[in-house]
Amino acid sequence: MPRTAAARGKPARPGAEEWVPASADVGKLAQAVHDCRGCELWGPATQAVFSAGPDDAALLLVGEQPGDSEDREGEPFVGPAGRVLAEALEAAGVDAERVYVTNAVKHFRFTERGKRRLHKKPDVAHIRACAPWLEAELSAVRPRVVVALGATAARAVLGREVRIGAERGRVLDGEAHEVVVTTHPSALLRLRDRSAYGAELDALVADLRTAAEAAGADAAG
């Protein structure tokens, strides 16, 4: 008899399909996500973190995963990276209240160091396991443009490996929407050369402005 993944000492990642309600609106998805056991990340996380923003937004932003602050508060982009994103959206002339924001992976993956919980990048397997949630969100919101914030989000949205430097800032054709790839706001916080922050922020602002223009007036501030 073949052994299960758990019996082999590997994490069980059946995928989220059985927990995603069919043809559900955002409200029902947001309720259902807390029961998801599609991968092992639900165990150590405080809670699933779903989304924020209007369910008819023309512009939809996808990040990587919740961070420590998001995991504790249950809302996306409420930590340091969220403050950078808010600054960039404002500079780009985008009304943050008209933007739908979510993450490719709904639970916080971390490693503990003393009392601190340090971000740990999701594996491709986590992205795949969580993909049904993002697919359901895209079907429910039906945005004109999706912005992928960082390489993990870009892989989730485009279904392939993406080099941010090679593809950022261009409007790419998708099946049901256009896609703009840019850096994740947290990358600006990790800059060793703090004098580079201004230039990197300007580049993020430019990418968001490109996405907003492609999405039309509904995304404008």
Image (tube, rainbow, N blue to C red):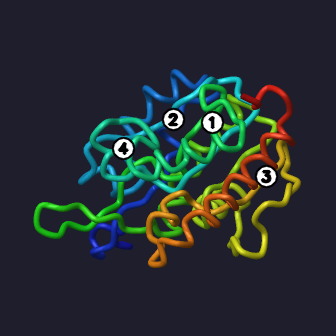
- The residue tagged 3 is 179
Label 4 – label 1 distance at C-alpha: 19 Å
Mark 2–mark 1 contact, CB under 8 Å? Answer: yes
- For label 4, the residue is 70
Q: Could you give the CA–CA distance between mark 3 and mark 4, rounded to whole angstroms?
A: 25 Å
Q: Nearer the viewer, residue 193 or 131?
A: 193
Three-letter amino acid code of the residue under disc 1:
Glu
**Residue drawn at (84%, 42%) of the image:** 176
Residues tagged 4 and 2 counted as in contact (Cβ below 8 A): no
Q: Amino acid at mark 2?
A: Ser
* Camera-nearest label, 2 or 1: 2
Q: Quadrant of the N terminus?
A: bottom left
Q: Quadrant of the C terminus?
A: top right
- Foreground tag (4 vs 2): 4
Kindly identify which numbered label has been placed on residue 176.
Answer: none
**Percent x, y of residue 53:** 57, 28
Q: CA distance from mark 1 to mark 3?
A: 15 Å
Residue, disc 2: 51
Horizontal and vertical percent for residue 203? 70, 61
Counting residues from the start of the chain, the first of labels 3 and 4 encountered is 4
Residue at numbered disc 1: 137
Whichever of callouts 3 and 2 sits on the residue coming sooner in the sequence is 2
Q: Residues within 10 Å of mark 4 (few under 14, many from 20)?
A: many
